[in-house]
């Protein structure tokens, strides 16, 4: 007899033996800790299929040549960097000028946010005192102007500084889209631009 609680309801069931695998014609027992009603062989087959389709996150054999990350995703055909998705082992042509990726940045200082733009955010953000980089949004001065107009009610006079309102914070969360470190997104955009320029 086995017991469990589901949704606050106490359930009991009689277990005579392990249930058989759900694959037609397979009579092998399902392990008690299996996430699906599949025998060990068919769980392994499903796992291999998942690895071929979605890859396996692991340490790269050597750092990514584009962003320096050590974390990669291994597919049967190749490794790719987990941060910038650069194919492991491919050379970066350093004789070409780096691509320009314009971004709108959101910097927080206390309860204020600066909405600005740059084609070289690393250099620009080093020059600006700030508490936290909240997000990057891919775009140039036109997008920056639209954001300034969109949040005009929160703007301090004619500056690029805005009061951190619930509306602005909701927009920043939408722009972040679950990406914890804005630099990861920027590195990916740079990688994509490098790949297109080759």
Image (cartoon, rainbow, N blue to C red):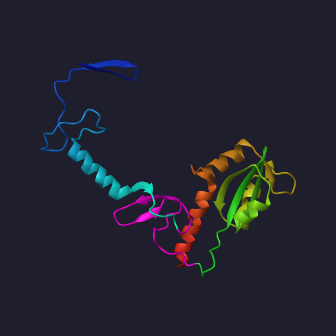
Q: How many marks?
A: 0
Q: Quadrant of residue 185?
A: bottom right
Front residue of 107/91: it is 91
> Does 36 lie within the magenta span?
no
Determine whether, in the image, residue 6 is placed left or right of residue 154: left
Q: In which quarter of the image is residue 32?
A: top left
The residue segment tinted magenta is 65-93
Q: In the image, is residue 128 above or below residue 31?
A: below
Where's residue 92, x and y in %?
54, 75
Front residue of 101/143: it is 101
**Whether residue 60 can be seen here:** yes
Q: Residue at x 66, y 50 (%)?
A: 172
Determine whether, in the image, residue 51 is placed left or right of residue 189: left
Determine whether, in the image, residue 64 is placed left or right of residue 17: right
Which residue ends up furthest to the bottom in the rendered image?
95
Q: In the image, is residue 122 above or below residue 13?
A: below
Quadrant assignment for the N terminus:
top left
Where's residue 122, x and y in %?
70, 63
């Amino acid at each position: 007899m086995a017991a469990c609680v589901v949704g606050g309801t106490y359930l009991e069931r009689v277990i005579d033996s392990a249930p058989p695998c759900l694959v037609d014609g397979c009579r092998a027992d399902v392990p008690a800790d299996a996430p699906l009603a599949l025998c060990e062989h068919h769980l392994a087959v499903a796992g291999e299929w998942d690895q071929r389709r979605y890859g396996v996150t692991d340490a790269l054999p050597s750092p990514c040549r584009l962003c320096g990350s050590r974390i990669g995703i291994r597919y049967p055909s190749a490794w790719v960097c987990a941060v910038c998705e650069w194919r492991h082992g491919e050379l970066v042509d350093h004789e070409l000028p780096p691509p320009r990726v314009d971004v709108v940045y959101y910097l927080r200082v206390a309860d204020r946010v600066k909405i600005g733009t740059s084609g070289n955010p690393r250099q620009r953000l080093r020059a600006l005192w700030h508490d936290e980089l909240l997000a990057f949004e891919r775009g140039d001065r036109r997008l920056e102007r639209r954001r300034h107009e969109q949040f005009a009610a929160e703007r301090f006079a004619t500056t690029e500084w805005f009061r951190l309102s619930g509306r602005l914070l909701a927009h920043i969360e939408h722009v972040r889209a679950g990406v914890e470190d804005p630099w990861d997104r920027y590195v990916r955009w740079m990688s994509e631009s490098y790949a297109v320029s080759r």
